[in-house]
Image: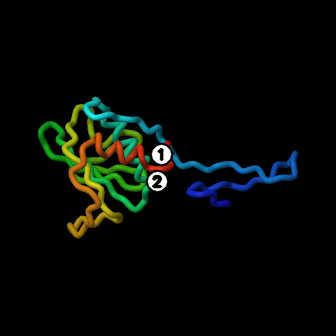
Amino acid sequence: MVRCGKMLLRSHRSPARNFPLQVPRFKDRRAVRTYAAGDQCSVGGLLESLEAYTDIVKAEVLLVKALVDGEEDEVLVFRGFSSSLIRSTPDDPSDPCLPEGCQIVGIDRLQAPYKPSGDQVPIQEGLTVAEMMEIVEACPGMR
């Protein structure tokens, strides 16, 4: 294995050629969608973008606060995965934790690892979807 920036490369020797052939190893990267202020966004697309962000920025945990059918829900996004803290989380990781049509109340950026006891160090609290997507789009490695 060879480290090239943040990407791990597997070094292979080509049988036909006598020089190393670099083959990048990628985790399951999802396409990042852009959102402007006031745009309607799908919750699944938002969670995919946040999962991709936390897969790159491993020192952060995102806590997404939402209203689902009038009930409060919190989804924790960390290292490329999301999990609901209040409702059941789908078995299939490709299914979004929040249903379409729910209202995102705010997004908190917290320092990793997540501590449910409340001793969590906040980086930013109460971000809107548009504010968080600006941070995601500005992150190196997302494009």
Residue drawn where x is 42% and y is 55% of the image: 79
- Quadrant position of residue 104: top left
Q: Amino acid at mark 2?
A: Ile
Question: What mark, if any, has residue 56 been given in the picture?
Answer: 2
Disc 1 crowd rating (10 Å Cα; few below 14, some 14-19, many 20+) is some
Q: Amino acid at mark 1?
A: Met
Label 1: state its secondary structure.
loop
Residue nearest the observer in this picture, 67 or 135:
135
The span from disc 2 to disc 1 (Cα, nearest Å) is 8 Å
| Mark 1 lies on residue | 142
Residue 40 got which mark? Answer: none
Location of the N terminus (image quadrant): bottom right
Q: Quick check: marks 2 and 1 in contact, CB under 8 Å?
A: yes
Q: Is residue 93 something one can see in this rendering?
A: no
- List x then y, in percent, for residue 12: 76, 53
Q: Nearer the viewer, residue 63 or 128?
A: 128
Residue at position x 12%, y 39% in the image: 70
Relative to 40, residue 72 above or below:
below
Residue at (21%, 51%) from the top-left corner? 126
Please, is residue 80 above or below residue 117 in the view? above
Asked if residue 2 can be seen in this view, the reply is yes
Q: Secondary structure at mark 2?
A: helix
Residue most toward the top? 40
Q: Position of residue 143 (x, y in %)?
A: 50, 42
- Across and down, in percent, residue 4 comes to 63, 57
Q: Earlier in the sequence, mark 2 or mark 1?
A: 2
Report whether 53 appears left or right of 126: right
Q: Within 10 angstroms of label 2, few (less than 14), some, or many (20 or more) residues?
A: some
Judge whether 79 appears above or below 35 on screen.
below
Residue at image location 43% in from the left, 56% down from the top: 57
The mark total stands at 2
